[in-house]
Image (cartoon, helix red, strand yellow):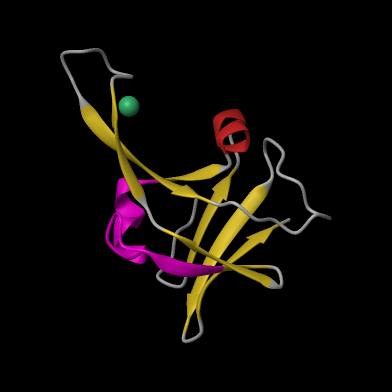
Amino acid sequence: MKNTKSAYTRDLSADEVKQHRLMVTKDALGFFPKPFKTFTLRVGSAEQETAVEAIECHCMGLAQPHEHYWLPVKAEPSEHPWERGKRVTIRKNEKGYSFEIL
Ligand SMILES: [Zn+2]
C-alpha cells in the first residue's frame, strides 16, 4: 500500500466490507484529523460527517490489548458497491477529503 501525504489507499478486506469502515493504519494516522474529530468526507456527489475511531482490540490476545483505527463510511456511489479486494482511495486537497472506490 502506498500512502502519500495527499492520498490514503487500501484494498478492501472482507471485514471492512462487512462493517463498512476502512482500517486506518498507524502510519496513516497523520493523514486524517485526530481520532474522534469529525470531518466531512465527500463520497461521489454526497457528503457525510465521519471521524476516525480508536477501538480497543484483543486480536493478539488478552495480554496485549491495543487499539485499531477505523474510518466508518456510510454512503457510497451505488454503481460502485464495496467488495473484497476493491481498491479505495481517500484523497485530501484544499477542498477537503474525498472517497473513491474503483
Ligand atoms: Zn488488534
The answer to which of 9 and 100 lies nearer the viewer is: 100
Q: Is residue 60 above or below residue 102?
A: above
Q: Residue at x 58, y 59 (%)?
A: 89
Q: Is residue 4 above or below residue 51?
A: below
Left or right: where 7 falls relative to 82: left
**Which residue lies most toward the left here?**
63
- Residue bounds of the magenta highlight: 24-41
**Ligand 1 rendered quadrant:** top left
Q: Residue at x 76, y 47 (%)?
A: 81
The spot of residue 62 in percent (x, y) is 21, 13
The spot of residue 2 in percent (x, y) is 48, 56
Q: Is residue 82 magenta?
A: no
Q: Is residue 26 above or below residue 61?
A: below
The spot of residue 35 in percent (x, y) is 29, 55
Q: Is residue 30 magenta?
A: yes
Q: Residue at x 80, y 54 (%)?
A: 78
Q: Quadrant of the C terminus?
A: bottom right
Q: Residue at x 78, y 53 (%)?
A: 80
The answer to which of 20 and 29 lies nearer the viewer is: 20
How many numbered discs? 0
Quarter of image, res 58: top left
Left or right: where 30 falls relative to 75: left
Q: Is residue 43 above or below residue 95?
A: above
Quarter of image, res 76: bottom right
The answer to which of 28 and 62 lies nearer the viewer is: 62
Left or right: where 46 falls relative to 23: right
**Which residue lies most toward the bottom here?**
94
